[in-house]
Amino acid sequence: MPLVHMGDMLRHAHRHRYAVGAFDLVELSFLEAIVAGAEACAAPVILSLAESHFEHYDFELAMAATVAAARRARVPVAIHLDHGASLESAVRGIALGCNGVMVDASHEPFEENVRRTRAVVEMAHACGVPVEGELGYVAGVEGEDAEKHPGEVVYTAPEEAAEFVRQTGVDFLAVSIGTVHGRLRGEPRLDLERLAAIDEALGLPLVIHGGTGLGDAQFRAIIERGVTKINYYTALADAAAASIRARAAEDPRAGYTGLMRDVRRAIRDEVERCIRLWGSAGRAAAVLAEARPWREIEHVILWNTDAGEERAAAAMAEGREKLARIPGVRHVRTGTAVDADARYRYCWLIGFSSVAARDHYRDHPVHVAYADGTFRPMAGDRVRVDYALD
Ligand code: 13P
């Protein structure tokens, strides 16, 4: 069970002063290369999916593959929604299998950032999912030239950061100390004193966005000062693109698979370089020993009714539609027994992201109204058991 609590993973990194790579993926080659790179280094890793990239792929389909990859990985993995734009994005990310979410309202004034972040924290914590907020503004766009999107970098102020954490309850904080998203000319100038002061004031895992372009010594310096999650994308995308260009030059008649032949290797090499540099190589066993496995819950109800097939089908359709929207619900499935003599004719299989999510669901007004108004009156004969899935 290599999917683990992201909070436990990052607290381990924070205590031992190393950083876990949060690599953004935009398609299957990235996913395979990131997991393979982490496995080759025996390192914990965060599979990160940025909302700003959703125009390039289908988030739901990518999440199905990401969850499958995490489950079969030999290293501890967390799945993170990167740069979530809204409460709805965070709910959707959790429903699809993210066990960490970022809410990025860093472009908003302090009060509005607090308000939006706190709303996500309340929802996500009720589902047992930790939250990353951002204070200060990291300019630029992942995968593009930084100077094309100059923006105004707003540095994070240590006192304000402490107040932000206090008011929002975030588990991790992304800070702005001079990095930018995207491709840079030369190394950025980092305000390391500021970072040290933030680390001192907060004592919780800090996150750096815009990892591409930092020099080796800069990485070491930020990790010494409390950075435990490094977001990284552009350099992986550039390695992939360089590999495709090289293949096209080598074989101008190459088809799609021919052009893509070396992409996974190129991404993986860069992932491994980062993992070794950031100190997470060789930490997988220690993290697995300490971090709680992320265990999803299956809520199983077997039931009968005297109301007839048609009303049972209508009730199940209503439940599938309403209950799936409750935060922390991963799926709502219903079924009818294959054999006519089955002890119970109908079933519900409702997946939750965690026990906390199951508890939250029980008292949620949408569930209470549906259960008391529609389901329970017609399903007197029923059994219910909740299973923590292995
Ligand atoms: P880079 O693309 O600059 O590495 O930044 C990635 C990032 O911060 C994603 O959130």
Image (tube, rainbow, N blue to C red):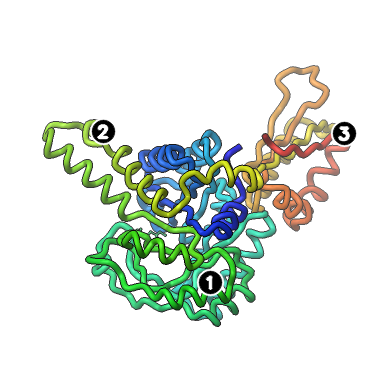
Please tell me whether mark 1 sits on a helix, a strand or a loop: helix
- Name the residue that disc number 2 marks: 261
Q: Position of residue 341 (x, y in %)?
A: 80, 17
In this rendering, position of residue 167 left or right of residue 299: left
Question: What is the CA distance from the residue labelled 2 to the residue labelled 3?
Answer: 57 Å
Q: Quadrant of residue 294?
A: top right
- Name the residue that disc number 3 marks: 381
Between residue 202 and residue 345, name the one nearer to us: 202
- Name the residue that disc number 1 marks: 199
**Is 337 situated above or below 92?**
above
Q: Nearer the viewer, mark 1 or mark 3?
A: 1
Please tell me whether mark 2 sits on a helix, a strand or a loop: loop
**Is 300 situated above or below 129?**
above
Q: Amino acid at mark 3?
A: Asp
In this rendering, position of residue 344 left or right of residue 356: right
Q: Nearer the viewer, mark 2 or mark 3?
A: 2
